[in-house]
Amino acid sequence: MSGANPTDFIGMNAYGTAGEKIGTIREALTEDGGKLRYFVVEVGSWFTSKEVVVPVGLARVEDDGVYFDTLSRDQVKHMNCYQLGEDYTDEQQVADIRVLKGTGYVPRSPQARPSRPPTTTPTRRSSRRLLGCSCSKSG
């Protein structure tokens, strides 16, 4: 993925465990220097969809889509909803990583984390749904 333009991934299908389609890449979040950090994945069906943030380190990019080999639909249900323009806080990052890695996850020290949450890339090829994001967690 190094050298790729973050917007190249927008619109690609996203696949989880066992190659099951879980959604579509809607955004790429980068650090101030342009390093790709997260994918925003739209998951769910039309009336129950939400966007979640998945670390790029869990991704494997192929010609036909972006694969998150360790990401299940059940994990996605328990992840925080992300909305464009909102901060992805340290607390949300830790909560989502605990969903992805298990409850025993211990975050790095605050000094080791970026000082500010990543910002979105300026180009967005997708349009927002009129119904907005359904941010409730199923459980």
Image (tube, rainbow, N blue to C red):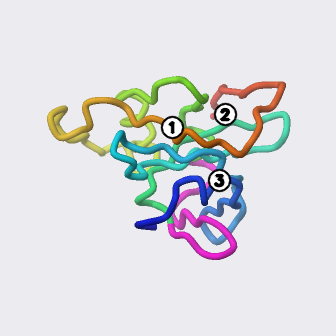
Residue 13 placement (x, y as % from top left): 70, 61
Residue at x 70%, y 53% (from the top left corner): 24
Which residue is denoted by mark 2 in the rendering? 138
Which residue is denoted by mark 3 in the rendering? 10
Side (left or right) of 75 relative to 134: left
User: Residue 76 sits in which quadrant?
Assistant: top right
Q: Mark 3 or mark 1: which comes first in sequence? A: 3
> Between marks 3 and 1, how big is the CA–CA gap?
12 Å
Q: Secondary structure at mark 3?
A: loop
Q: Nearer the viewer, residue 72 or 121?
A: 121
User: Residue 9 sits in which quadrant?
Assistant: bottom right
Side (left or right) of 45 relative to 60: right
Q: Quadrant of the C terminus?
A: top right
User: Residue 8 sits in which quadrant?
Assistant: bottom right
Residue at x 84%, y 39% (from the top left corner): 46
Label tally: 3
66 is within the stretch colored magenta: yes
Q: Please tell me whether mark 2 or mark 1 is closer to you in this view.
A: 1
Residue 107 — which label?
Answer: none
At label 1, which amino acid type do we have?
Answer: Thr
Magenta residues, as a range?
60-75
Residue 39 placement (x, y as % from top left): 53, 49
Residue 29 placement (x, y as % from top left): 48, 43
Which residue is denoted by mark 1 in the rendering? 120
Q: CB of mark 2 within 8 Å of CB of mark 1?
A: no
Side (left or right) of 116 relative to 61: left
> Relative to 64, is 9 above or below?
above
Q: Please tell me whether mark 2 or mark 3 is closer to you in this view.
A: 3
Q: Secondary structure at mark 2?
A: loop
